[in-house]
Every structure is written in C-alpha cells, then in structure tokens.
Image (tube, helix red, strand yellow):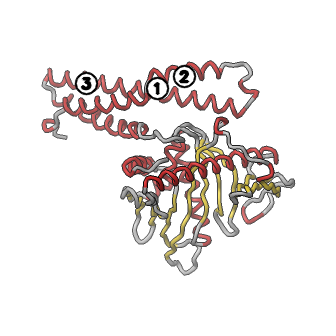
C-alpha cells in the first residue's frame, strides 16, 4: 500500500466524526444506567421464579454490556490509531505508516457495521424477532429451499452468539419444510432481520429431478417483532378457535403420543398460528398466543401506516414481492434486487454470512424512507 498518497490525518479525522455520531446515538451514559438497572434486576433473589422474565432480563443485560464494551473498544482503537499516526509522522517511519493504514482500513470496516445500528430507530427495531419461513411455488424444491433458508438464519444467529428457539415446524412429505417459525432472542433482532422479509428465489439444477433439469423455486420470509407485556393486545376468547393435535415429524410421522400441538385461529382476521415444538399443550398454547399477538400488533401498525400514506397521498408499495435471488446454476450468485448487493460465494451465504446483505438492506430502507 502506498501510504504516501493517503492523508492519514484527514482519514482519522473522518473516523472520529463517524465515532462521534455513533457515540451520540449509542449514548454510553444511558447504556451504563441501563446496565446498572438490569444488574439490580438480575440480582433479585426471586428473578428465576418467572423464567421468561429472567431470560429477558439476562439477555438484555448481556446485550447492553456487549454494546458498551464494543463502543469503548472502538473509541480506544481510534485514540490508539491517532497516537500511532503521530508517532509515524514524527519519526518519518513508512513501516509504521503502513501499520496505521492497515488499522485504519480495519477500523473503517468495523465502524461501518456499527454505524448501521444508528439507523435502527424504528418503533419496534429494538425488539427480539419471530421469523416464519414458508415454502412457495416449486414443489419439493421449494420445501428444500425453505429448509436451506432456516439453516442460513440459524447459522447467522449462531455466528453472532444469538440464542434462537424453533417454535413450530411443518415438514413436507418428500423433503424439506412446508413452514417453520422460530425466535431470535436478542435485542435489535427485529431491526436487523426485518429487511429479510419478502420472497426469496432459488435457481439450481434440482436434486429431486431425475432428468437433472434446472428448477426455480420460491420461499416467503416473514419477520415480526416479539410482543412485550406493554403492548396490550387484548384477544377475547370468543375471537379465537383452538384446535389440538399430535405433533408430527418428517414424512408426517407422529412424534408425540399426546395431543400437545396447538393451532389457534383468530376468527376476525383469519390469522392462523400453530405451535408444536414445546413439550406440553399449555406451553404450545402460550407460545402460539404470543406469536398471534405479535402478528396482530403488526397488522394494526400496517393499517395505521396505510392510513397515514393515504392521507399523505402516497400509496406506492415500498417492497417488491421478490427481494433476493440465489442462483446456483448456470453460475453462482446471490443478489438482492432492492439494494443491488451481490456476492459470488453462495456456500458462504447459505452458511450464514449475510451481514453485508442485512447492512445493505438497512441502509436501503433508510434511504427509501421505508418504516420498520
């Protein structure tokens, strides 16, 4: 690298400006106050009397501590870089300048990812997420694609150390999944994953076609925020129908000898939620009601947003039906059709390396004025 052509001082000054924006939004003092409050809650002797609340408190505490640590580390790295650059200039040392330039590039990349968080200012962005994947057109290939997407998102969460919980799995007859619903239990999971909502398309040589023909298949991804106790979504018992049945595994085989799986139908809207991955009917009903409340919350928000757009005279759809293509034949490419971001390493994407797609989606959404 020819560091002589790089104005290190101005580059570092630009980094410090970005850091100032990040710090203003992250608000370290507010983070410290939040950590103190959550630490007090976490030390309460009766905390684990309510497992759900305890998990929420400990998860929020861990996330806040990680956020503060990352902010402090980045601030320290910028300070150290500035000192190192000054030493390089005083000693007129090209080797040290090379070191500064390398760290500058590394910091720029890390701060770009961190800066994306400052764009997550939507009403529900801070929430945990409930993700549902449904196989679309394409038969068995679509069911297999739905399972590939499930693995992609679970691997993404695993890479970041985010806890997940599969709530409901409906297996297809031959292979793959008809649908699956899972939670990502970390703050800002919804803000990040909400840009994944939409129709995903897969193009490949079908492993299920004995003639080896190319097949196009589709899967739909829905992301909603997990409801909180403050959301107050009242659902009268008269508005729901509850059916119970036995949990099933691949090929439709029964995996439970009791009727523990639960299907709740919200009669006024027709929304149906099924849960079968918990051990008891009571747990499955509670999980299903939580997801139903989340969907009703988002339906209410969508209705309010539609009214606002109508009043503003803006009735344009912000999201297209097909938002990303995964092409495995005749070439290898994953391309987001909204942001134009694309990569050639399809294996890495299906192994959970989707941060660049999420970042591009968040920036695109902010630029397009799409609310989350």
Residue at disc 2, secondary structure: helix
Residue on which the image places disc 1? 68
Q: Residue 184 or 344: which is nearer the viewer?
A: 184
Secondary structure at numbered mark 1: helix
Dividing the picture into quadrants, the one containing residue 117 is top left
Cα distance, mark 2 to mark 3? 30 Å
**Of 67 and 297, the residue lying toward us:** 297
Query: Residue 163 in the image: x percent, y percent?
Result: 60, 40
The picture places residue 47, in percent across and down from the top left corner, at 71, 24
> CA gap, disc 2 to disc 1?
9 Å
- Residue, disc 2: 35
In primary-sequence order, the first of circles 2 and 1 is: 2
Upstream in the sequence, badge 3 or badge 1?
Answer: 1
Tell me where residue 276 appears, x and y as whole percent.
75, 52
Q: Name the residue under label 3.
A: 82
Q: In this view, does 97 lie to the left or right of 177?
A: left
Would you say the residues marked 2 and 1 are in contact, meaning their CB atoms lie under 8 Å apart? Answer: yes
- Horizontally, residue 157 falls left or right of residue 13, namely right
Q: Quadrant of the N terminus?
A: top left
């Amino acid at each position: 690298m020819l560091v002589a052509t790089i104005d290190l001082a101005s580059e570092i000054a630009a980094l410090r400006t970005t850091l100032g924006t990040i710090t203003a939004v992250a608000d370290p003092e507010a983070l410290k106050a939040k950590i103190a409050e959550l630490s007090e809650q976490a030390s309460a002797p009766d905390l684990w009397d309510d497992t759900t609340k305890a998990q929420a408190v400990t998860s929020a505490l861990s996330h806040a501590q990680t956020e503060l640590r990352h902010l402090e580390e980045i601030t320290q790295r910028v300070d150290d870089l500035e000192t190192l650059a000054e030493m390089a200039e005083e000693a007129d040392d090209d080797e040290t300048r090379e070191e500064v330039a390398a760290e500058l590039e590394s910091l720029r990349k890390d701060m770009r990812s961190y800066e994306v968080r400052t764009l997550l200012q939507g009403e529900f962005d801070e929430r945990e997420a409930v993700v549902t994947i449904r196989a679309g057109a394409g038969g068995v290939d679509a069911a297999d694609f739905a399972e590939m997407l499930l693995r992609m998102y679970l691997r993404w969460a695993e890479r970041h150390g985010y806890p997940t919980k599969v709530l409901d799995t409906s297996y297809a007859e031959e292979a793959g999944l008809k649908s699956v619903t899972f939670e990502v239990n970390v703050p800002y999971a919804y803000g990040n994953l909400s840009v994944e909502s939409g129709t995903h398309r897969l193009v490949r040589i079908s492993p299920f076609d004995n003639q080896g023909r190319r097949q196009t298949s589709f899967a739909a991804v829905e992301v909603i925020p997990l409801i909180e106790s403050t959301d107050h979504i009242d659902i009268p018992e008269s508005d729901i129908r509850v059916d119970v049945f036995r949990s099933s595994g691949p090929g439709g085989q029964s995996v439970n000898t009791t009727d523990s799986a639960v299907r709740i139908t919200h009669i006024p809207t027709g929304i149906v939620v099924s849960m079968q991955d918990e051990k008891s009917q009571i747990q499955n009903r509670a999980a299903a009601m939580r997801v139903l409340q989340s969907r009703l919350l988002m339906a209410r928000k969508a209705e309010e947003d539609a009214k606002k757009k109508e009043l503003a005279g803006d009735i344009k759809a912000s999201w297209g039906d097909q938002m990303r293509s995964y092409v495995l034949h005749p070439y290898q490419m994953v391309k987001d059709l909204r942001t134009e971001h694309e990569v050639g390493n399809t294996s890495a994407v299906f192994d959970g390396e989707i941060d660049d797609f999420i970042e591009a989606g968040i920036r695109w959404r902010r630029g397009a004025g799409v609310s989350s």
